[in-house]
Image (spheres, helix red, strand yellow):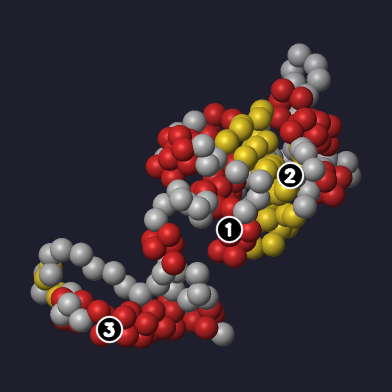
Amino acid sequence: MKCSILTICPEQFGDFRKTPVIARAEASGKLNLEILDIRDFAPGSFRAVDDSPYGGGAGMILRCQPVIDALESVRTPESHVVILVPVGKTYRQADAHRMAEQKHLILICGHYEGMDARIYPYADELISIGDYILTGGELPAMVLLDSAARLIRGNIKEASIAEESFEDGRLEYPQYTRPAEFRGVRVPDVLLSGNHEKIRQWREAQAIAWTRKYRSDLLE
């Protein structure tokens, strides 16, 4: 997969590239990550990428020209373009699987008070990671790419993915590790029994119980 991220804050992605999932994918050649500074496509010595909104209002708006020129510099017929903005549909695990299958993923990070609405038609889809406002789309872009990169075949063990939360529409079962007892709370005996069928049944029941307790909306 190739992923091109269009941003006015390219420095935010420095440490992100060093995180295990992303670094492993890049080192193995499974991911080709490209960070483009939208300011490089803005004319003039000040490289202004924003302006005040028509009609008045607080804040600044990302201008069409630098964003669209940046996009057109990397877009190909195989590209899938995503804009990270609050008006987008809420991102789900199923979307992460779709993103992981893209040959060339382009992520455009919104910023300031928003972006010129004339940019939206250039995208294949608009995505939000939740009903709250961030300073920009850089963190959502990292969330999206991290969730997709770990699903690229061979990047992490497939067994680690198969039983995760949201893969089958519910939460994963509770997990435990050593010590077997901590401050009077013991690990469930069935997990220490060595009986794999009973463990499977227990995990199945606990996954439903945890989903009902913490995310009942998933069961609905």
Is disc 1 placed on a helix, strand or loop? helix
Is disc 2 placed on a helix, strand or loop? strand
Residue farthest top in this picture? 45
117 with respect to 143 (left or right): right
Is disc 3 placed on a helix, strand or loop? helix
Residue at position x 54%, y 80% in the image: 217
Q: Earlier in the sequence, mark 2 or mark 3?
A: 2
| Amino acid under disc 3 | Glu
Q: Kindly report the distance in space between the C-alpha atoms of the residues bearing marks 2 and 3.
A: 45 Å
Residue carrying label 1: 96
Graded by Cα atoms within 10 Å as few (under 14), some (14 to 19) or many (20 or more), the crowding at tag 3 reads few
Residue carrying label 3: 197
| In-front residue for pair 144/76 | 76
Q: Earlier in the sequence, mark 1 or mark 3?
A: 1
Residue 167 shows in the view: yes
Q: Nearer the viewer, mark 1 or mark 3?
A: 3
Graded by Cα atoms within 10 Å as few (under 14), some (14 to 19) or many (20 or more), the crowding at tag 1 reads many
- Residue 166: image location, x then y, percent: 50, 70
Q: Earlier in the sequence, mark 1 or mark 2?
A: 2
- Residue 101: image location, x then y, percent: 62, 54
Residue carrying label 2: 79
| Amino acid under disc 1 | Ala
| Amino acid under disc 2 | Ser
Q: Quadrant of the C terminus?
A: bottom right
Q: Nearer the viewer, mark 2 or mark 3?
A: 3
Graded by Cα atoms within 10 Å as few (under 14), some (14 to 19) or many (20 or more), the crowding at tag 2 reads some
Q: Quadrant of the N terminus?
A: top right
78 with respect to 130 (left or right): right
51 to 167, vertically: above or below: above
Q: Kindly report the distance in space between the C-alpha atoms of the residues bearing marks 1 and 2.
A: 16 Å
